[in-house]
Image: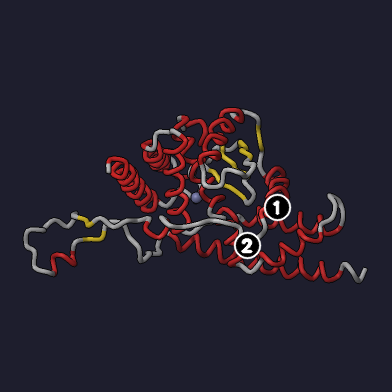
Amino acid sequence: MNRQSPKRFTLAILSLALLLASFNAAEAQRKRSTKEETTTVGSPVNAILDLGSSMLNSATSYVDVDPYSQFREQQYSNEGLLSERDEIKLGNTIHLEVQKRYKIVADGQARLNRIGQRIARASRRPGLAYQFHVIRDKELNAFSTPGGHIYVTTALMDIASDDQLSSVLAHEVGHVVARHSLKTLQQTQMLGGIADLIGSVTGIAGDTAQQLGTLAAQLVGSGLLSVHNREEEREADFLGVHTMAKAGYDTEAMISMFQKILNVGERDSSLLNELFSDHPAVQERIDNTRYEIDHMRNSRRR
Ligand SMILES: [Zn+2]
């Protein structure tokens, strides 16, 4: 009994941390549309005008600013986070809870897996055993969890061509490559406790496994793992468009997918998950993707 109490204590602390974290996540999401970041694409030409150039009189003129400059030399690994083995264990435990909460169906699974595996092999984390799952839902949504589980709703699959679906999957694989969910757990001070819990799980059954399950249920319920800040979204888009190109998909489809999402949202915003409902952000993602496609074309020409 005494041996178990530290574990219970750990779980209690983690639950509290999760409660606070999910509150912060909801708050962050609420603020997302109003929050302005310092890095913007296409800075107005005010600076140039200040230098006295009267030739530039259009307020819509923009100076090219690389929206992805901070990601170009980025290297990715599990160092300082969870080991890959523990990340996979955590992902599998979370998947059991996702299965309880959402309706995972076989429709379209073969198509999703075919496109997903092609994207995964072309990604910067090709060694991971990715698993792609279809969720029956009328909302447009996709999300990923640690360890390479990726989920897409039937509504999104129904409106997307193969190339467009590849852009969504390449973006989600990008989150897994950049370990965004693990970084979220680290920022909320939960990663150490989770590592301890995983480390003490010796079998499938048992008290600790159950506690890990409880925690996973809370993680799924809070939606914490699918909340990413704008910088993480930008990074996943950047990794995604490159992965699409490497896998031989048409990168223009990332832009047409964003436009489809905007169109659906204009008809019925209730069909957009909160991840997509932030219109200015979607327009910014279109502009950034256009920038990167041109950038890739120019680099090839050189
Ligand atoms: Zn994302």
Q: Are marks 2 and 1 in contact (CB under 8 Å)?
A: no
Residue indicated by mark 1: 85
Ligand 1 contact, mark 2 (Cβ < 8 Å) = no
Question: Circle 2: is it few (<14), some (14-19), or many (20+) Cα within 10 Å?
Answer: some
- Check the picture and name the quadrant holding the N terminus: bottom right
Which residue shows up at 69% across the image and 69% down it? 16
Total tally of numbered discs in the picture:
2
Horizontal side of 61 relative to 77 (left or right) equals: left
Q: Quadrant of residue 265?
A: top left
Q: Nearer the viewer, residue 36 or 163?
A: 163
Give the image location of residue 118, x and y in percent. Answer: 53, 34
Give the image location of residue 86, x and y in percent. Answer: 71, 55
Which residue shows up at 13% across the image and 56% down it? 58
Q: Is residue 41 above or below residue 150?
A: below
Give the image location of residue 141, x and y in percent. Answer: 53, 43
Q: Residue furthest right?
A: 1
| Colour theme | secondary structure
Which residue shows up at 61% across the image and 50% down it? 145
Q: Quadrant of residue 82?
A: bottom right
Give the image location of residue 193, x and y in percent. Answer: 72, 66
Residue indicated by mark 2: 81
Q: Nearer the viewer, residue 112 or 260?
A: 112
Which residue shows up at 81% across the image and 61% down it? 200
